[in-house]
Every structure is written in structure tokens, then in C-alpha cells.
Amino acid sequence: MYPKIGFVLNRTFLTNNKTRQTGMKVFCGRANPTTGAMEWLEEDENYDYHQEIARSCYADMLNDKDRNMKYFQGIRAAVRRVKERGEKAIVLDIGTGTGLLSMMAVTAGADFCYGIEVSIFLPYLIDFSKPVSRASASYTVKLKPVKSGKAQVVLSWWEIDMDPGGSIKCSLAPYWVQSTFEENPWRDHWMQCVYFLPNEEAVTQGRSVDLTAFHDDYSVWFKLQKSSFRNEGSKTSEHTERPVCVCQAHLLWNRPRFGELGDGDRTSCYFQALKKVLKPNSVCLSMSDGSLLPVLAHHLGAEKVFTLECSSLSRSLMQKIFMANHLEDKITILEKPPELLTPSDFEDRKISLLIAEPFFSTSLLPWHNLFFWYARTALESHLSSDVTVLPQSASLHLMTVEFKDLWRIRSPCGTCEGFDMRIMDDMIKNSLDFRESREAEPHPLWEYPCRSTSDPLRVLTFDFQQAIPQHPLTEEGILNLSRCAKSHGAVLWMEYHLAPNISISTGLVQDSNEKDYCQWTPHCKQAVYFFNAALEPNSPVSAASAVAYAVSFNPATGEVNMDFKLLV
């Protein structure tokens, strides 16, 4: 959400002695992740309201049929128990949404239902006159490993008992641990929790271990150790402090970024590409947030290595990494915007090798990392006439897909357990039509199974050897669908061409197969553009035979605009 910085007064018109007012506009400031510039935009005063609704996946719970069915069963059972005691069933529904549970309660025979729609409430009070209680609770259970190996993570989830007898359960358990496997329900709004143990713990089949769960007001963490004589299920006096990052890396890098840096195959691609272009007299400048490319460049023998870090946190972390590897006097860290760098920053040398992954922590969509291209253009005067740029170029690719479940976050609900929810559908559609329905949104597709319905297509190419062009890059055409299926949307991703025959993909990592699910890199999010016509539950399964597309890159704004139309 953009911060509201100011506002534009609404205009007043006089018509037949009556006053008519248009809506108020607000000025919003935002940092453009692609160009790096601070922009001021004039927005409708309700833009953030529509944005919140459009991005909230508001209806995904109502598309969870298993959840809705069990809530209805649980409410019926609860109302029946109260009635059997000869009491009136007075229901209090505290929620923030559709009133679905209230309608279920009334339909189940409740005498009266109070529906409280909560926007802000006070769950507890903090008394600043008293010391803060840092007490945390813990609970230990004994486990017998069913296989020998190394324990690395603790996977936890919760279950809801909808009735006291426990006969109606709503579980978040993964499908592979459930005793009676059925089609795993779509439940993206409730997810499992993965806790990474501080160290791998060796476990032996049949030999008991103690798993201790700790929690405070905000966090849950675990400890795994060899079994003691403590009774199972007992509380323990042992205490393990909540893990807090002291290295700064976890503040700068998220889990996918750690995975990216730890991917040996990916690192090998950069290593091999650098070997092809780096010379003993190379003056190298690296441009990526918290990248290890400067270490590789020094290791391969570059004469001088500079690295540009755009934040103090990133600079501090990289200083620690370089010092730990005794490279603090070998690699020079610069902390300036590219356009403010001077010849003295480079010790009056010209850059002969400009390198990047590229990766920038402000990027959300795949093409946001084109910030590297803008930085390269700003550095033009500091580059030698025969400068080598790695990656040499990038390309934007797209492919149409059929999602197993992800389409549900944008699909109308219609009816839910017999209740008409079309008013809510119209509200969400109105907010989507405000802007979001014409834009792509980021999703980690390795988590969301999908099958291709077309071949991958390269639509735009960006030449990093040259400065940014003044005119837009555009491409349009018709993409034939390769199989009879419902195409829910188009997926877009970037590929970076480091050197001849060496490329890095931020999307598809294995040629798609019409029968198997697509394989996506787990380190990056891809851009998904949903086809509105295909999201209707009753739309024809395979009516479309092709997709007309138009994709453009605007150098002035750094935006990638797109439009798609299903063709019958």
C-alpha cells in the first residue's frame, strides 16, 4: 500500500442550482522498484480500500468446501445440544466477513444470533506501570522415530474439534499424514508451520526422543533432544530462549533467498560464466543486494572488485562476510545510489566488468530486477569502452496454464452451503475491476500445481550491453493452446543470459509436459495474470483455442503492461 502524503481538494460544479461534487483525490508517494525513482501518483481516495479487497483473496475460505461443511455440521450439533438441555440457543458470531456462520446458526434452529463484525478490538491490556512478563510456556512429548536419519525441521499444524465428542474435525494436516486420504481440500488460508531446528539431529528408528514445544505471546519454537526419564506430556522447567537473529542475514534475506544462495547448481552457472569473461586485469563492479558474486570475482583473479550495496543493513552484513573470509581489504563496498557515484569512488578507474545476478530486495514481480538495467545506464560514464556486462541480456517469457487450485482465489463463490453469496462476489469484482484485474500478481508457483496449456514463449528481450532505449519495447501476437483444458491464466517470468549457453531462469526450470505438473524454481515468485472469463465455475472447460496477447515495456516508467484475450 502506498503512503498517503497529501490530498487534492475535490472540485465543485453548479448544475441547475444544485451542487455536485466529484470524489477527492490523494497524492501517494511510492518508490518505483524498477527505476529506483520516488514517484508521486494521484489516486482515488478509495484506492486503498479497493486494493485491500482485491488482494485479500477474500473468498478463498468460502471456496473451501470441507471447511464450510464441517462448520455447518458443528453449528448444527452445537444448537442441537443446547436445545436438548431445554435452553434457548443464543449465538454470538464474532467475525470480519460475510456473516456466513450467522446464517448457518439461524438455519440450524438458533433462537437468536448476534453477528458482530469486528474491525478493531482489544484482546488484552498492557500496563506500562508493571514489569513486562517474559514467561513462556513449554510442553514435552516423547516420540519414537519410524525411520533413522537426520531431523531438520518440525512441521506443525492444528485441528479444530467442531463438537465435544471429536466426531467432526477440521484438520490442517498434510494429506500424507491423514489416515483416510481423500482429495486434499483447498485450504490456502490455513497453512502448516515449518520450524527449522538450529542443528540437524540424528535420530534412530525406535529410539525415543523428546520434542519440546515452546511458545510466548507471538512465537512457537521447538527443541529436539535424546529422551530423558520425564513423563510424556509433562511440562518442563527447561527453557530455550526464542531464537532471534544476531547475524543480520535473516533480516536481509528471506527463505527463498537463502535457498537461492545455497543452490549449488545456480552458483556453478555464475562461476562458469565469470570464468569465461573475467580477465586478470578486470576492474569489476557487482550490483545486487547481498550477493556473493564479488567473492567469486575475487576468487577468479579480478584485479579490483567493487560491490554496490544500496542499504546500510546490506552493507553491514557484507562487511561481516568479507571479514570472515579475510577479504575486507580485497573488496570495496560502496553505499550510494548509482547516479551519485563519482570517479573517486572507483579510485579513478574505469569498470571493465559489470556483474549482477540480478537480485534486489525491493523486487516483487520478475521484471522489477530490471533495476539493474537502469543502474547500468546511470553508470555509463564510469564504464570502459569495451565493458563486459554479465548477464548479457534478459528475456521475458510467458505460458498459459491450468491451475489445480490457485484459480479459486479469484473465482466467484456463488452459493455456499445453500447460501447466496453473490452480493459478496459483486463487491470483490468491483474492487478487482478498479485495477487489479488488469495486472499480474506475484505467486510462488512451486507451491501451486499447474499444467501448461501452451508452449513457453519469449516475448521481450532486454539487451544489457546497451543503455535503456528511449522507445517502448512491444510484442503482440496469438498463442495457440496446445491441449483441451481450461486456461486459467498466463504465467510470466524472466530468464537471464549470463554467457553463451549459460542462462538462469526465475520461472520454468524443466520443459513442461501436458500430463505432468510444471516444474518451477522455488527461489523466485512468478507473475500470474488471471483470465477473468476462465474463472467462472461454470465457464466452458475447453472453449478457447488460442490467446491473443500484447506485452509492452515502458522505459520511462519501468512498467510492463499486458493484455490477454481468450479466442474461441
Image (cartoon, grey):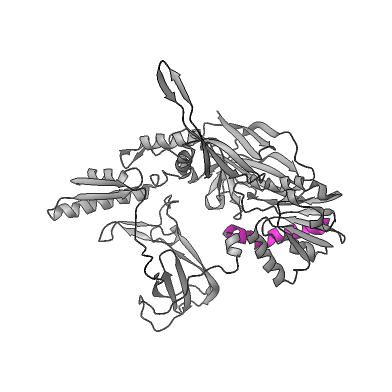
Q: Residue furthest top?
A: 16
Front in this rendered view, residue 32 or 488:
32
Specify whether residue 274 is painted magenta: yes
How far across and how far down the image is residue 176, in percent? 45, 60
Image quadrant assignment for residue 336? bottom right
For the image shown, how many numbered marks are present on the structure?
0
Image point 45% across, 45% down: which residue? 56
Image quadrant assignment for residue 213? bottom left
Specify whether residue 360 is painted magenta: no
Residue 351 shows in this picture: yes
Image point 79% across, 57% down: which residue? 345
Front in this rendered view, residue 558 or 441:
558
Front in this rendered view, residue 61 or 93:
93
Q: Residue furthest left?
A: 86
Image point 69% across, 55% down: which residue? 288
Magenta stretch secondary structure, dominant? helix
How far across and how far down the image is residue 425, in percent? 40, 36
Compared with 321, 184 (above or below) is above
Horizontally, is 340 left or right of 280 in the view? left
How far across and how far down the image is residue 171, in percent? 37, 57
Image quadrant assignment for residue 294? bottom right
Q: Residues in magenta?
A: 255-277
Q: Residue furthest bottom?
A: 229
How far across and how far down the image is residue 365, in percent? 60, 46
Residue 486 shows in this picture: no
Front in this rendered view, residue 492 or 253:
253
Compared with 310, 137 (above or below) is below
